[in-house]
Image (cartoon, coloured by chain):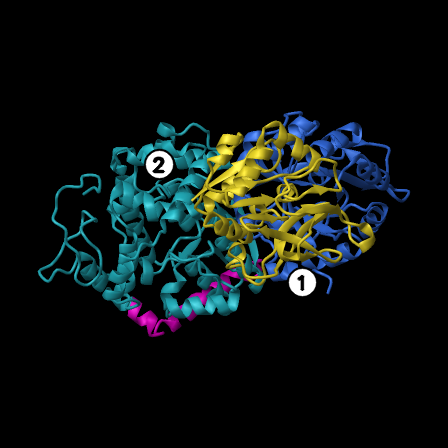
Chain colours: A yellow, B cyan, C blue
């Protein structure tokens, strides 16, 4: 089970590699378009600002490569900022996103009575059965840390919701492209289940 | 005979227990029963049977009375070494039920598993007991641990075991406590081939191995000389050690249920799984480097005690008790903790094993000392000078 | 507010060893940090903070080897603090697998460091540590370098400044309460929580799980403790403990 992890200067690679190993997968870092296109399945991590993320992908030629990879039907998982980059854009910046899932990211509003960023453990409610969330126990919780949340245009692209000052999309799926707002690599056994499921995809 | 000279002796297994020729000293009688059976029947069977039938309750009561009397006016009556395992947990629960006031002591080897720590916490919290933990400078411990692995001797768990005795004695002395309760018991530990591991109590041996293979000076690690261990504490300080479990009916399935129910004990699978090092040591290191599996001794003891049938033991032994993915994880963790690469650890394991007799040890002199003190003790008792 | 309150052990490291200082003076040796992290990880701890107390005071710099070893045992967020003064260092630390960087002395004596790190990592990965000490005349001061120097700011001022400069979280410690098992400094927590909108993590004085609810009610988003999770009983025996998942869940407001 091979997973390619995109290394573009943002995001917590060490933890994903470690958890992948524990989950029984082989995780390799990739940073060039060729490497991405030669992969079986790809994880796009990311922590930080939207524009910086897109800039870095762009300067490495990875924007086109990721679009092509997604078009080939192979599994692509975006984590945290990586998930937000999958959509068309974000309130946080001006760059266009990868456009693989129609929608945008918007900032959490303090007026909803919550502190921003959303930081901590929270539950995730899948909206339907899906191989990615198979085997998750009822008391599953995941670690979130983000100030922006995704709003997919199509309701069917919403895979799971989480409540933080109101429900928001914590997981998305458009065919072979999936996203998780939380950090599976920081979510103990629950995150491990997600990664194991993705490795088997 | 040493495990190191693994000569071509044809394989044979005891017909009563599951001990076999991976113990080079084993002998069989005409019926194929190993020497351990006869030894057990001669030495332990009667005592164990009486205990299991509850017939030792008078002796137990007398012992408890003595302990309580000696403990009057002191903050505790007994010191108990706990590890999070079944034996020491049940021992502590039994002591409290008998009305004793224990001080629990624990040696933190740096290898505690999460389950062990949890069990210790639940035990002291649910019974409201005080705990003392001995810690050792990790760099010393790591160095000593590596030294033993490099020495190639079978008892690589010596660094942890050697320190246990010190902690209990030291705390007992501190509070003027005259009694230590030990979790050792005949049900699971009546058999232990000497070829499978030299005693951890030999400080001369420990220091010799450390001198040869170690690099960090031992400043916080408690080295206890045999003289202190066998003479000073027991005879001068008058601290006696009692294997209390040998006075009680002791049946594992019932015991495990009780401690789970009464003190929140969690079963983590496998004897000695409370230490990550020990489970790797017994589950991988010994079989891989030395060719024997300590489970044989453990199960054989249980068989002789009537806790397990031979068939059950054989079935259990056929099961892999150490899943490979856990083994690999432990292996990497141990290498990381010891500060060496996995390749280095593999190289150590691949190098030829050695016998403890290859290094300085005080086996002969200790035996002589033991015999001497036993004889003197006997005389003194006869003269009424020693109780 | 939805989302569970976090319960966070704080581990202090000195010379590569786990230690527990008593009231910022002297140290009590605890053991090997790697095994401690592994055990907390198996206990499904919400989050962990590791602070290298030598790094700033003795200027030993960031111990990347130790951080790497710790990160490989942790499948939950880990915050690291101690001697981090630049965005480059912060990036390197998070690249290894650490979730957040805790800025202490550097932040309050060189505020641009906060902005730099927040810009490089994002606010949510930037924590500023505010160590408060009570004034005899009432109120508190903020101190740096493990309590050795006063900054002239109150904790409220320091926390506000940190948020303005981009910090996504404040780690608020009571120097007076640390290691005393006498409960959290609730007025301190209240004052600072009301002054900022970023999450506040309360640290210092926890003696038992019953202390957590009052701290959360006072406005903290998370509670942290050092001694309580590594020491047990009157003999201060080294023993790691942590509430069960259901005990942690019980802290959520219904």
The disc label shown at residue A37, or none: none
In the rendered image, the quadrant that contains the N terminus of chain B is top left
Question: Is residue B117 shown in magenta?
Answer: no
Position of residue B311 relative to residue A147, above or below, is below
Query: Where is residue A158 drawn, in percent x and y?
Result: 63, 55
Q: Which residue occupies the foreground of this view, B93 or B240?
A: B93
Residue C101, located in which quarter of the rendered image?
top right
Of helix, strand and loop, which one carries label 1?
Answer: loop
Mark 1 belongs to which subunit? C
Name the residue carrying label 1: C250
Mark 1 crowdedness (10 Å alpha carbons): few <14, some 14-19, many ≥20: few
* Rendered-image quadrant of the C terminus of chain B: bottom left
Q: Which residue is at 30% across, 44% downward?
A: B286
Task: List x then y, in percent, for residue B147.
Answer: 38, 33
Q: Are marks 1 and 2 on the same chain?
A: no
Locate residue C105 relative to residue A6 in the image: left or right.
right
Q: Which mark is residue B149?
A: 2
Query: Which residues lie in the magenta part?
Result: B48-76
Please rate how many residues cluster around mark 2, counting C-alpha atoms within 10 Å: few if below 14, some from 14 to 19, many from 20. Answer: many
Q: Residue at x 77, y 57 (%)?
A: C214
- Nearer to us: label 1 or label 2: 1
The residues tagged by marks 1 and 2 sit, at their Cα atoms, a distance apart of: 46 Å
Given residues C90 and B64, the one toward you in this image is C90
Furthest residue to the right? C137
Tell me: A182 left or right of B387. right
Farthest residue in the left direction? B30
Q: Nearer the viewer, residue C184 or B55?
A: C184
Residue C235 can be seen, yes or no: no
B329 vs C138, left or right, is: left
Residue B292, x across and y down, in percent: 25, 48
């Amino acid at each position: 089970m091979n997973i390619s992890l995109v290394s573009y200067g943002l995001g917590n690679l060490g933890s994903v590699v470690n958890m992948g190993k524990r989950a029984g997968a082989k995780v390799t870092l990739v940073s060039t378009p060729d490497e991405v296109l030669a992969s079986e399945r790809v994880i796009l991590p990311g922590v930080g600002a939207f524009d910086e993320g897109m800039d870095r992908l762009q300067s490495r030629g990875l924007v086109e490569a990721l679009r092509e990879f997604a078009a080939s039907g192979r599994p692509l998982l975006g984590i945290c900022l990586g998930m937000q980059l999958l959509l068309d854009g974000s309130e946080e910046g001006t760059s266009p996103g990868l456009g693989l899932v129609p929608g945008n990211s918007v900032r959490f509003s303090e007026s909803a009575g919550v502190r921003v960023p959303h930081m901590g453990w929270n539950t995730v409610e899948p909206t339907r059965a899906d191989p990615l969330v198979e085997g998750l126990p009822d008391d599953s919780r995941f670690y979130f840390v983000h100030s922006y949340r995704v709003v997919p245009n199509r309701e069917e692209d919403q895979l799971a919701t989480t409540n933080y000052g109101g429900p928001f999309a914590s997981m998305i799926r458009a065919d072979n492209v999936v996203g998780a707002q939380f950090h599976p690599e920081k979510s103990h056994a629950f995150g491990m289940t997600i990664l194991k499921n993705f490795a088997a995809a | 005979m040493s495990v190191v000279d693994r000569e071509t002796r044809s394989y044979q297994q005891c017909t009563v227990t599951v001990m076999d020729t991976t113990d080079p000293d084993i002998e069989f009688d005409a019926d194929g029963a190993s020497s351990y059976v006869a030894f057990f029947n001669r030495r332990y069977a009667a005592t164990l049977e009486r205990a299991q039938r509850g017939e030792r309750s008078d002796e137990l009561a007398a012992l408890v009375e003595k302990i309580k009397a000696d403990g009057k006016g002191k903050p505790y009556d007994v010191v108990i070494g706990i590890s999070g395992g079944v034996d020491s947990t049940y021992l502590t629960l039994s002591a409290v039920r008998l009305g004793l006031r224990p001080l629990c002591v624990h040696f933190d080897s740096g290898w505690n598993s999460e389950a062990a720590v949890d069990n210790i916490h639940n035990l002291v919290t649910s019974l409201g007991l005080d705990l003392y933990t001995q810690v050792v400078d990790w760099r010393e411990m790591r160095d000593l641990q590596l030294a033993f692995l490099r020495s190639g001797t079978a008892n690589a768990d010596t660094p942890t075991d050697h320190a246990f005795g010190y902690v209990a004695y030291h705390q007992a002395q501190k509070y003027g406590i005259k009694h230590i309760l030990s979790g050792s018991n005949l049900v699971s530990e009546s058999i232990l081939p000497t070829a499978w591991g030299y005693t951890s109590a030999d400080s001369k041996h420990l220091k010799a191995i450390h001198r040869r293979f170690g690099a960090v000076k031992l400043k916080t690690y408690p080295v206890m000389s045999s003289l202190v261990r066998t003479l000073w504490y027991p005879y001068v300080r008058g601290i006696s050690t009692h294997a209390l479990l040998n006075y009680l009916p002791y049946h594992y399935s019932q015991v495990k249920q009780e401690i789970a129910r009464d003190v929140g004990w969690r079963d983590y699978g496998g004897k000695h799984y409370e230490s990550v090092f020990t489970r790797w040591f017994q589950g991988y290191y010994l079989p891989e480097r030395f060719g024997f599996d300590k489970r044989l001794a453990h199960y054989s003891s249980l068989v002789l005690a009537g806790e397990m049938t031979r068939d059950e033991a054989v079935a259990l032994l056929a099961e892999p008790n150490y899943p490979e993915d856990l083994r690999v994880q432990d292996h990497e963790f141990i290498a990381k903790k010891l500060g060496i690469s996995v390749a280095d650890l593999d190289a150590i394991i691949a190098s030829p094993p050695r016998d403890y007799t290859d290094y300085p040890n005080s086996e002969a002199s200790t035996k002589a000392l033991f015999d001497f003190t036993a004889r003197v003790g006997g005389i003194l008792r006869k003269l009424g000078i020693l109780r | 507010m939805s989302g569970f309150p976090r319960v966070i052990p704080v581990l202090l490291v000195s010379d590569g060893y786990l230690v527990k200082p008593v009231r910022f003076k002297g140290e009590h040796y605890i053991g090997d940090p790697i095994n401690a992290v592994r055990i907390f990880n198996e206990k499904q701890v919400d989050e962990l903070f590791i602070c290298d107390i030598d790094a700033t005071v003795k200027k030993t710099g960031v111990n990347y080897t130790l951080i790497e070893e710790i990160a490989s045992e942790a499948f939950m967020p880990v915050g690291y603090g101690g001697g981090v003064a630049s965005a480059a260092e912060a990036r390197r630390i998070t690249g290894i697998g650490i979730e957040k960087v805790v800025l202490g002395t550097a932040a309050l004596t060189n505020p641009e460091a906060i902005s730099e790190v927040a810009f490089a990592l994002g606010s949510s990965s930037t924590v500023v540590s505010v160590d408060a000490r009570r004034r005899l005349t009432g109120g508190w001061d903020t101190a740096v370098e493990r309590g050795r120097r006063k900054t002239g700011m109150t904790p409220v001022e320091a926390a506000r400044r940190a948020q303005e400069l981009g910090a996504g979280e404040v780690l608020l410690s009571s120097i007076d309460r640390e290691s005393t098992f006498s409960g959290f400094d609730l007025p301190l927590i209240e004052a600072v929580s009301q002054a900022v909108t970023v999450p506040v993590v309360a640290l210092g004085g926890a003696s038992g799980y019953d202390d957590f609810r009052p701290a959360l009610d006072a406005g903290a988003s998370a509670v942290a403790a050092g001694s309580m999770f590594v020491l047990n009983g009157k003999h201060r025996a080294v023993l790691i403990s942590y509430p069960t998942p259901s005990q942690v869940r019980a802290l959520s407001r219904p």
